[in-house]
Image (tube, rainbow, N blue to C red):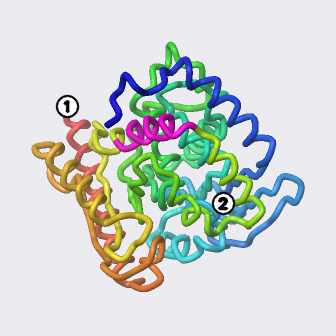
Amino acid sequence: MLTSSMLPTESELLPRVSMVHRLCASLFSRKTSLFSGNLPGRKRDRDREQYQIVITESDSVMANKPVVVLAGWLGCQPRNLRRYHDMYDELGWTSVIRIGSPQSLLNAMTIGPSADQQSSSEMLSSLAISLLTGILSLQAPYFVIHIFSNNGCFLWEWIRYLLFDIDEQSSSLDLSTVDIYNLRRKLIGVIFDSAPVYYNGNIVGLPSALRYIPTKEKDHLLQIASTIDTHLIKRRFDEFWNGLCNDTTNTPQLYLYSSSDELASAKEIERLIQYRSNLKEGSGSNIVWKYNFTDSEHCGHILKYPDVYYGKVKQFLDSCANRRYCDVSQQSRL
């Protein structure tokens, strides 16, 4: 059995992390950054390989609408999120799409936000900061984050860190464009779709997670992943999972999962849900929500059960909005 004394120290691991990140950066240059409005027409910048969904609504209309962040799974493209965009559009929400790159996933598997090093996880830190800046510019009354698989989870980890855990005085990150207090107040819920994935520091299942990535790019990523110290991956996983379990915020969370999901274990998700339910007992009702679709595939619940999916999301959003209204009304009376 491994003990903490047998693991490499942080000073021994960081040089290896830097080397892996430099190699990774030389192989991957894709960065996906999107906003979406009513018309999800896709535009591609072939030089930077960026996909964009153009906002077609006026600023005055958008300012009155809540915002949902759709944090896509690895290899996801905007067209894959069309159903979710249309669902939220019907509910009266503006969609903002963010999809972390393969490089950002690899970075996230080796070092997390707690290190507070902009160079060590540059892709996700910059993606999270630009996302929060964009949400502020939309002047939404409130927003929700809807994440898919661990690619979305790693982005949520950074957002949670920026809004609730960061020490602004000592941080090396440039947060001049982020109004943390305002954003924290406007975040009313988080939806986990097929997430989180319990990989326990083991990259054996990585090929399955990369199934939507082009073959050449996937082979490069797997080659790099095979060079990373397994102790580092395990230590990072423990940090990632413990952060999800012991999230101290009172932001309501909805878990949408399936017993037939071969990537995101329903057993581990339900353990997480039970742990968080016990942790949040006494913090008020409707903090932790869940629904097991039983026989749908990974990130495929809306495809098999569109009406049920719509109903569960709407019920959760209505509860979150009502909860915020009650909180705001109570504060106004103080």
Please give the label number shown on residue 334: 1
* Residue occupying image coordinates x 51% and y 25%: 115
As shown in the figure, which amino acid type bears the numbered disc 2? Ser
User: Mark 2 touching mark 1, by CB under 8 A?
Assistant: no
Q: Position of residue 106 (x, y in %)?
A: 61, 45
Majority secondary structure in the magenta region:
helix
Between 323 and 283, the one lying in front of the other is 283
Q: Position of residue 118 (x, y in %)?
A: 63, 27
The quadrant in which the C terminus is found is top left
Furthest residue in direction front, as rendered: 1
Question: Does residue 126 appear to the left or right of 69 in the view shown?
Answer: right
- Disc on the earlier residue, 2 or 1: 2
The range drawn in magenta is 229-241
Mark on residue 58?
2
Residue 279 lies within the magenta run: no
Residue drawn where x is 17% and y is 45% of the image: 280
Q: Which mark is residue 154?
A: none
Q: Amino acid at mark 1?
A: Leu
Task: Identify the residue at image location x=55%, y=17%.
Answer: 11
Q: Position of residue 293 (x, y in %)?
A: 32, 77
Quarter where residue 47 is shown? bottom right
* Disc 1 element: loop
In this view, 291 is above or below 72: below
Total of numbered circles in the picture?
Answer: 2
Kindly give the residue lying farthest to the top in the view shown.
170
Q: For residue 158, say whether it is visible.
A: no
Q: Is residue 287 left or right of residue 62?
A: left
